[in-house]
Image (spheres, coloured by chain):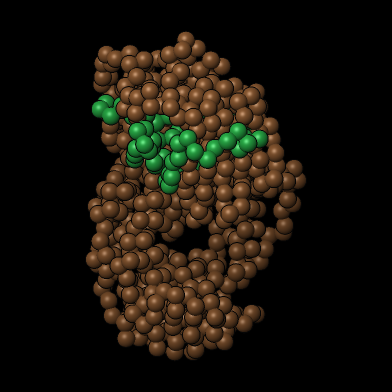
Chain colours: A green, B brown
Amino acid sequence: MTTGYLVKQENSSKQDGQDISQVIENSNYKKVGNISFPFTYVLSVQSTAGSQSFTVDVKEVKLNEGVTKEDFK
Amino acid sequence: MKKLYITAISTLLILGVSAQKTLDRSKQPIPGPAPVISITDPVQYTLPNGIIVLVVENHKLPKVSATYSIDAGPVTEGSKAGVLDIMGQMLSEGTTNRTKAAFDEATDQMGADISLSSSGGNVSALTRYFNKAFLLMVEALRKPAFPQESFDKIKSLTITGIKANDKNANAISSRVVNALVYGTDHPNGEFTSETTVNGLTLQDVKNAYTSYITPSRGYLTFVGDITPEQAKALAVKAFGDWKGVALSLPKLKEVANPSKTEIDVTDVPSAVQSELTVTNLISLPLSNPDYFAVLLANQILGGSADARLFMNLREKHGYTYGAYSRTGYGRFQTTFSASASVRNEKADSAVIEFLNEIQSIRNIKVSEEELKNAKALYNGTFALSLEDPARTAAFASNVLINNLPKDFYKTYLQKINAVTTDDVERVAKKYFNYDNTRIIAVGKAEVILPGLKKLGYTVNQYDKFAKPATANTPIAVNISANDIIAKYIAAIGGADELKKVNSYSSTGEMTVQGTKLTLTEKKLAPNLELTEMQMGGQTVVHEVFDGAKGYQTQMGNKKDMTDEELADKKDEKGLFPQLYYNDGTFKLEVAGVEKVGDANAYKIKVTGPSGKASTEYYV
């Protein structure tokens, strides 16, 4: 309880009638401008069909550039 | 902030699974007539260095296969757990004569299959290439190069694999079950962990190679289009001058079952199902006459989708997709076990039904009809297995390894068919424990524990590495949820900075089963979101939320977001949702302190305006 960072999130939902539980663990916080973002996170998805874990390495974060309303059509 | 990715990925996971073909189980296959069995004995030689050579001649196809297998028995690896597995993989990483690439090319040119492991090697090829392919396999076994960079690669892949299974209830269950049943100092109970693999060096691999890849206790089997003379000449040429460490079978201490039935629980908070295992240790060498009756008793109890456990737990009660039992056998202690993945809410009811079925087969004689069906199944599968000439070779080496009478397999069906309903009852009592068994439940403890505690057995809790779980001493929380969130906002840059952000875009990478996926995420104030997942330049998932509605396109299929999904999205009011947690529409509750990795984290339950809850951990 030192950094204040968000390190883990748990959600559960139903998809096509199946219970799915999802966990994200954030780490490797780095600054982009004046704001810190996690650059590594591990996603774990569990459902009755099985469970899997993925590690995502964020390569680049951009703030206030290159995004327009057109992107969300 | 990352919810979109997850929806996309979990959908992919489900689609992948639902694409599997379902079997037609509406028709019952008709049993065929009892087959007549004839098994020819393989030709057998012993090389001067002790290797036993077995040859099964079969000229139906112009193909030969050979297996070299070292009977080291169960090996205790201790603090070096995982070294044998990695050593086995290292045997396919090139030889002192040629690089891995050259080795693989030579194999491919002949259309041969060569595989190696820590207990030997296997090769198959067309007759005209067989000699060359065989010598290649032997080269890999006898002259491995053990390059450092391959070791580093395999080590890192092994660790990635362990991490990927970190929260997998199934993987945790198989580890915990063995560790509890045998104890972690037993070769069957110890397990490979990130720590043991991290500690391994290339020298450890070389040491393991010297200790376990040897002509001692070696069996070399040839099957196919080859004469015993040719096979012997080849064996002498390849292995004749080979020397190595003498192996002896390890002596393992006898492990006891619990004196009274107990329930052992491992908490996997994210588990959507509980892995239940009811298991006890047994000793059942193939030479024990009980062997045949145990096979049939197990068949009736839980050997198939027609058996009692399946009919009860799945068909009658709907607790699970499938429930089965199995019995090990052989020279060393092994287990009887019955298991299923069950709905968390039904874990206690499922335990009761497992025990009921075990009690019932122990105390009530099975019907003649059930026994007849179980026998018919063995007669059929046994006869079918003989179609494969390699089977005959496996029988021959089994007879040698297990010190069995020579006619063991020739009289196999006779012995199966001689089993009576009395025998089944007697062996069920002896091998399927009821009063002194172990029930291991790996699942969401919060849901399963209260019910399991009511069953009247001692309940023990273990962590996911089978260590007794220390009771959590609750740490007093003297900070409000709002303060924790405020601290978080300050930590990542402060509200003023966060409010300056109008748009966000990121690219990331992940690897799924060896395939690299690229993830793109874009966000625009207030709460527009886009997620894209690409594989080899092709978009596989595309998900968009424009603030009011959204859709997902996956492999060309477009699906609008459901009301539930939209409500979830709308709960995120901005690029940094935490900025809005104190606007009066969210409910925050500090649910204590929990470990995340090594750190203590505040656990906060967040309920959004839609009523949807999630849990967040702040350190």
Q: Residue at x 48, y 51 (%)?
A: B511
The picture places residue A61, in percent across and down from the top left corner, at: 44, 41
The quarter of the image holding the C terminus of chain B is top left
Residue B184 vs residue A3, the one in the foreground: A3
- Name, please, the residue furthest toward the top: B584
Residue B541 vs residue B494, the one in the foreground: B494
Q: Residue at x 64, y 63 (%)?
A: B384
Do we see residue B133 in this rendering? yes
The picture places residue B173, in percent across and down from the top left corner, at: 42, 40
Do we see residue A21 in this rendering? no
Residue B525 vs residue B311, the one in the foreground: B525
Residue B501 vs residue B161, the one in the foreground: B501
The picture places residue B495, in percent across and down from the top left corner, at: 38, 22
Image quarter of residue B617: top left
Q: For the image shown, how many numbered marks are present on the structure? A: 0
The picture places residue A17, in percent across and down from the top left corner, at: 63, 30
Q: Residue at x 26, y 58 (%)?
A: B200
Q: Residue at x 47, y 10 (%)?
A: B584
Q: Is residue B586 above or below residue B324?
A: above
Q: Is residue B129 above or below residue B371?
A: below
Q: Is residue A73 above or below residue B513?
A: above
Residue B383 appears left or right of B132? right
